[in-house]
Image (cartoon, rainbow, N blue to C red):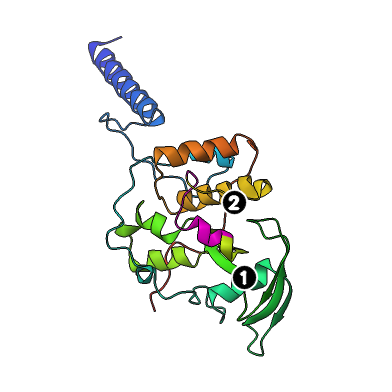
Amino acid sequence: MTPRHVACRSQHLIRLTMSLLAGSLVLAGCDVGNNPINSPPRTATAFTGTALQAVDVLTVKGRSPKTGYDRREFGSAWVDTDHNGCGTRDDVLAHQLDAVSRGSDGCKVLRGVLDPDPYTGTRITFIRGHSKIDIDHLVALSDAWQKGAQQWSDSKRRAFANDPLNLVAADSSANRRKGDGDTATWLPPNKSYRCDYVAGQVSVKTKYRLWVTQAEKDAMAKVLAACPDQKLPSGGNPTETAVR
């Protein structure tokens, strides 16, 4: 082999080695400059594991001050974000109640039955104007504000407040006892619903990339350890909606 052939072969081997090395680094989560690759956080619609596994993906940070929080920061209540002509509250009632009776506009829910109420396990009759049913945010707006939502756009906060993934029809008294509590401070009295409830909170926090406190994460893991095969809910509306 001539010196020229030896040199060419050596250069070829060097290039091949460098290419293989670069590929290995990328697979290991680094680029060829040894800098971490910032993979985007998983979302509720993309995560295919269980709710318990999803807890490990959540970012842990301290709770931010509640300074500046106001319900109006999340837009007008129950707007029509899915553009079906009906407000979010009536959409949720129509979907989650049985024996629903609507008004002449085809939207307004006049009567229905919540059986069982997820928070208490009881049967509650809904009569418009005399309702003992609230539409609760699984992840309270104030809790979201203290764990990332302060930095969001108006359209993202509006989407969050009206996302069906984050909404549940429930007993009003239980909902008001919950307040803006997270998993570490409040769980539904109906123990049979707790896995679904916590899985829902994990899903919402995953989808909107909200963080959790360490106490909250520990509480989530404790509840879901009793139901390790609990699936992570997915779906709901886009995380941005037009501001009106």
Residue picked out by circle 1: 132
Local packing at callout 2 (Cα closer than 10 Å; few below 14, some 14-19, many 20+) is some
Magenta stretch bounds? 174-184
Please indicate, yes or no, whether residue 137 appears anywhere in the rendered image: no
Query: Which residue is most to the bottom?
Result: 104
Most foreground residue, 146 or 8: 146
- Residue 27 sits in quarter: top left
Q: Is residue 175 part of the magenta span, yes or no?
A: yes
Residue picked out by circle 2: 188
Most foreground residue, 230 or 44: 230
Q: Residue 72 carries which label?
A: none
Task: Give the quadrant of the N terminus.
Answer: top left
Q: In x, y percent, where is residue 4?
A: 24, 16
Residue at left 56%, top 67%?
A: 135
| Three-letter code, disc 1 | Lys
Q: Distance between the residues labelled 2 and 1?
A: 16 Å
Q: In the image, is residue 91 above or below residue 65?
A: below
Give the secondary structure at mark 1. Answer: loop
| Three-letter code, disc 2 | Pro
Q: In the image, is residue 75 above or below residue 119?
A: below
Q: In x, y percent, where is residue 228?
A: 63, 35
Q: In the image, is residue 175 above or below residue 12?
A: below
